[in-house]
Image: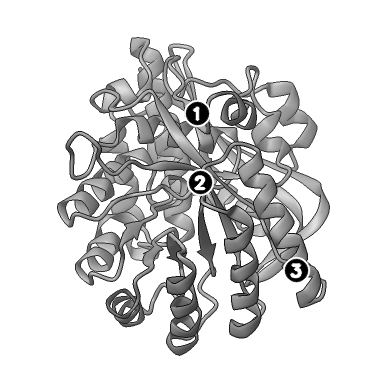
Amino acid sequence: MKITGIMSHVLDCAMPEELGYSQQYYARRTAHLVEVTTDEGLTGWGECFGPGSVALANKGIVERVIAPMAVGMDALDRDVVWHRVYNLLRDHGQKGMPIQALSGVDIALWDIAGKAVGLPVHKLIGGAHRMDVAAYGYGMMLKRESVEDHVARFADEAAAIIGMGFGAAKMKTGLGPREDVRLCEAVAKAVGEARFMVDANHCYTTSDAFYVGQALDELGAYWFEEPVAPEDLEGYRELRAGLKVNISGGEVEFTRWGWRRLLENRGLDIAQPEVCALGGISEYLRVLALAHAHFTPVVNHVWGSAVSVATNLQLLAAMPPIPGGLHPWEPMLEFDTTENRFRDLLLLEPLDIQGQVARNGGRVAIPTGPGLGVEPDRDFIRQYEIA
């Protein structure tokens, strides 16, 4: 079965309101889908991590750099395709956008492989350790408002997320260490007995991260995500050694080689790989094996459209329990509670994550259809496609 075409679809729309995190505010939402076609009529779908102009640049890499390398190859030889593309791109970027672009192509090839044999991706990996997974909701984004308004809004949003049925809520920080502690205190009170997590998007120096982290120790936060810059491996290690709260991160790390350094550094309590960025499903499975070899639990980073969500559900199903036993540590699905039509309206048969959470005690079922188990609506794609 030969690959006959590799195309990108960059979708864009205005958001109902401007939102932000510690690095920027944004008022538009983007998704970058990859479509791979074959000479036997099967089509696979994947997704590349990266918003806005990054998505547009990655479209060029997918269609003008990767496609000429892969078209004509056997679509079922996905690992051969992966290594051919990576080896030819190695001199031009072992991290970042070339690997994000390769990720979308690889995911689409896994989708094709599942469709070719009529099995979901989790069966191709080796089977499902679970057929549903707990979900946590994140929201509490930054806005152009006062600290006092942030505090009041974060408390309301945290309570609302738990009220939707999610078992845990994740918040953003980035106003400044002292102001951020006030936000964390409000959220900790609002969630009651439920878990809450804090995502800094690498905005702190190590000393400021200790200041916030020590407050999180007292507040009982479950994890402190990306407290310092991803390059600061020493800072991660110091924070993990000096704080009680779990230190998490890794969404901007790429391939097994980058993850090897990150895990050997022993700076993470929880690893958060992003399958649509690090190299796709093929490379994710190698990273997962590395993480578990270091006895590091994994909670996938999930951002993007319904294709990303479906991909992650397949991977969460196939993730072995760590360390095992009657009541092993279990992963969770990350779910963005802000408006996202590229997730909620993209598919011919929507996943309805929020509905499932409300109906099923905070849990989400694993799709069982062939491949990723979902199919995008081409009319919807045409409506929002900009490139």
Decide which of 147, 50 is in the foreground and name it: 147
Q: Is residue 109 above or below residue 322?
A: above
> Is disc 3 surrounded by few (<14), some (14 to 19) or many (20+) residues within 10 Å?
many
Query: Left or right: where does residue 325 sit relative to residue 39?
Result: left
- Dot placed on the residue nearer the N-terminal end, 3 or 1: 3
Q: Quadrant of the N terminus?
A: top left
Q: Which mark is first along the chain, 2 or 1?
A: 2
Q: In the rendered image, which quarter is residue 257 located in?
A: bottom left
Q: Secondary structure at mark 3?
A: helix
Marks 1 and 2, how far apart in space?
14 Å
Residue hosting label 1: 364
Between 106 and 148, which is closer to the camera in this rendering? 148
Q: Amino acid at mark 1?
A: Val
Given the image, on which type of amino acid does mark 3 rest?
A: His
Mark found first going from the N terminus, 3 or 2? 3
Alpha carbon distance from label 3 to label 2 = 24 Å
Q: Which element is circle 1 on? A: strand
Left or right: residue 55 versus residue 103 is: right
**Rendering quarter of residue 122:** top left
Q: Residue at x 29, y 63 (%)?
A: 258
Q: Is residue 198 above or below residue 98?
A: below
Q: To which residue does mark 2 refer?
A: 302
Residue toward you, 223 or 102: 223
Image quarter (top left, top right, bottom left or bottom right) of the C terminus: top right
Q: Which residue is mark 3?
A: 150
Marks 3/1: CA–CA distance: 30 Å
In the image, which disc is placed on residue 343? none
From the viewer's perspective, is the residue at label 1 or at label 2 nearer?
Answer: 1
Question: In this view of the protein, can residue 170 be seen by the observer?
Answer: yes
